[in-house]
Image (cartoon, helix red, strand yellow):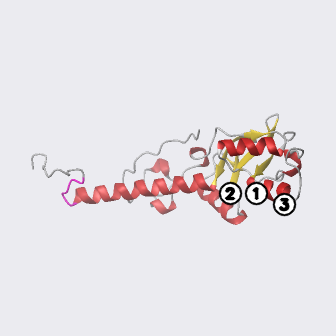
Amino acid sequence: MVRRQPLEPMLDPVRLPDRLLLHKQPRTIEAVMASTRELMVTEMTTATSDETVAEVATRMSTNKIGAVLVVDQGVLRGLLSERDVMQRVVAGGRDPRATRVGDVATRDVVVVDVNAPLKSVLQLFREKRFRHLPVVEAGKPVGILSTRDFLAFLVEGLERFIDDSRYKSSLAGDVDPYDHIGGSYGR
């Protein structure tokens, strides 16, 4: 269900390829981030303002997601999260079968552009304490980014970087890390 751009292996553990850099001068792995386009979920579950919270909550549960974009005729109208359902419906004593999504969804939604660097997205997540951010391109909703997806992306990239560094270090020490049998391939 999640479509992401595949990461390519790191070519050098210290200096990264220029195409992966945010800035013109070379940077180390700590300073490099990809764009939002590479991480966002594009196969989104959406809702309309006139659907009931019960209908949408069931869809959220079935799809194991924590938020849906509220979209009416291609226009982003809001975001309905699990937190919205708990605070504005359940704790508010409202009937989810009679409450419309448009009445309880967060309306003033902060969005992020599809080409935004992930460093700026992380800053938004931290400052605003969001767990989900709608992604837009030319003002139209094209995806959603969650802190869970963001963290998984960072961990995967870091693990790949560490593995690549260990492999290159082993090769530099004239040891083949994949030679588990003890053969030396003609050495």
Q: Does the magenta stretch include residue 176?
A: yes
Residue lying farthest bottom?
A: 127
Q: What residue type is labelled 1?
A: Arg
Residue 173 vs 140, above or below: the answer is below
Which residue in the protein does label 2 denote?
131
- Give the mark nearer the N terminus: 3 vs 2: 3
Task: Tell me where residue 155 appears, x and y as whole percent.
Answer: 49, 57
From the viewer's side, name the closer residue of 4 and 2.
Answer: 2
Residue lying farthest left?
A: 186
Q: Callout 2: helix, strand or loop?
A: loop
Q: Which amino acid does label 3 sit on?
A: Ala
Which residue in the protein does label 1 denote?
83
Between circles 1 and 2, the one closer to the viewer is: 1
Q: Does the magenta stretch include residue 174?
A: yes
| Contact? badges 1 and 2 (CB < 8 Å) | yes
Task: Tell me where residue 170 appears, x and y as whole percent.
Answer: 25, 58
- Give the mark nearer the N terminus: 1 vs 2: 1
Residue stretch in magenta: 173-177
Residue 99 - label: none
Instruction: Name the residue located 23 percent from the left edge and 56 percent from the top edge.
Output: 171
Task: Tell me where residue 3 appears, x and y as whole percent.
Answer: 57, 39
